């Protein structure tokens, strides 16, 4: 689990171009990890668009956003294209990262045994330390986007 004050667990996942993206690639930047249950699922659409709407502010603050779901690179690519997302969406097909960040949700949509990402937001500072952790009570709950952006921009 990645608690506040812990070193963020390292990972390498595939982006929408099926290229490896490693958390270490962002050393020296603040990183917002946005775990989301699934592309094209209403609340996730709104969440990704909210972060996209804040990209200018986040770029000015040397802050990167990485969306992480259990969706395939192809589904994530179409999702990113539809909403013109300027940040990477990463595929955690084996759920290792979802589990290492304690961001798993079981039974989405009433599908027993289906494991996806819950709606979880983690802010990692420039030194790779978790500084903020928000977990939805259920995947339909959204974070306070303005508060996350303000916090990430201030560290």
Image (tube, rainbow, N blue to C red):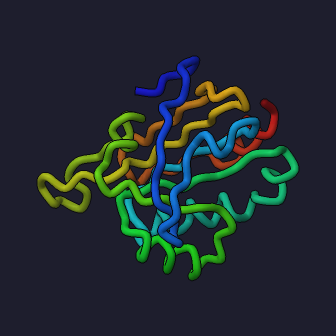
- In front here: 20 or 46? 20
The image position of residue 44, as x and y in percent, is: 48, 63
Q: Residue furthest top?
A: 5
Residue 22, image x, y percentages? 55, 47
| Residue at (19, 56) in percent of width and height | 114
Q: Which residue is more in the foreground, 101 or 136?
A: 101
What is the number of callouts on the image? Answer: 0
Q: Nearer the viewer, residue 145 or 48?
A: 48
Q: Where 116 sits versus 10, above or below?
A: below
| Left or right relative to 74: residue 65 | right
Residue at 47% across / 71% down in the picture?
Answer: 76
Image quadrant of residue 85?
bottom right
Quarter in which the C terminus is drawn: top right
Above or below residue 74? Residue 121 is: above
Identify which residue is drawn at 61% across, 40% down.
24
Q: Residue 79: give x, y in percent of width and height.
A: 50, 75
Q: Quadrant of the N terminus?
A: top left
Q: Is residue 65 left or right of residue 106?
A: right
Residue placed furthest toward the left: 112
Left or right: 37 as drawn, with respect to 85: left
- Relative to 16, is 30 above or below? above
Q: Position of residue 78 (x, y in %)?
A: 49, 80
Q: Residue furthest front?
A: 20
Q: Residue at x 47, y 60 (%)?
A: 14
């Amino acid at each position: 689990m990645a608690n506040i004050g812990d070193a963020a667990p390292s990972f390498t996942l595939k982006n929408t171009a099926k290229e490896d993206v490693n958390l270490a690639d962002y050393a020296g930047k603040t990183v917002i990890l946005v775990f989301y249950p699934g592309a094209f699922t209403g609340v996730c659409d709104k969440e990704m668009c909210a972060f996209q709407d804040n990209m200018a502010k986040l770029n000015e603050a040397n802050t990167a956003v990485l969306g992480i779901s259990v969706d395939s690179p192809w589904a994530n690519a179409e999702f990113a294209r539809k909403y013109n997302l300027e940040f990477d969406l990463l595929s955690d097909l084996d759920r290792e990262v979802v589990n290492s960040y304690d961001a798993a949700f079981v039974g989405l949509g009433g599908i027993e045994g289906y494991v996806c990402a819950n709606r979880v937001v983690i802010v990692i500072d420039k030194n790779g330390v978790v500084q903020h952790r928000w977990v939805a009570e259920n995947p339909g709950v959204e974070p306070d986007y303005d508060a996350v952006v303000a916090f990430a921009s201030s560290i």
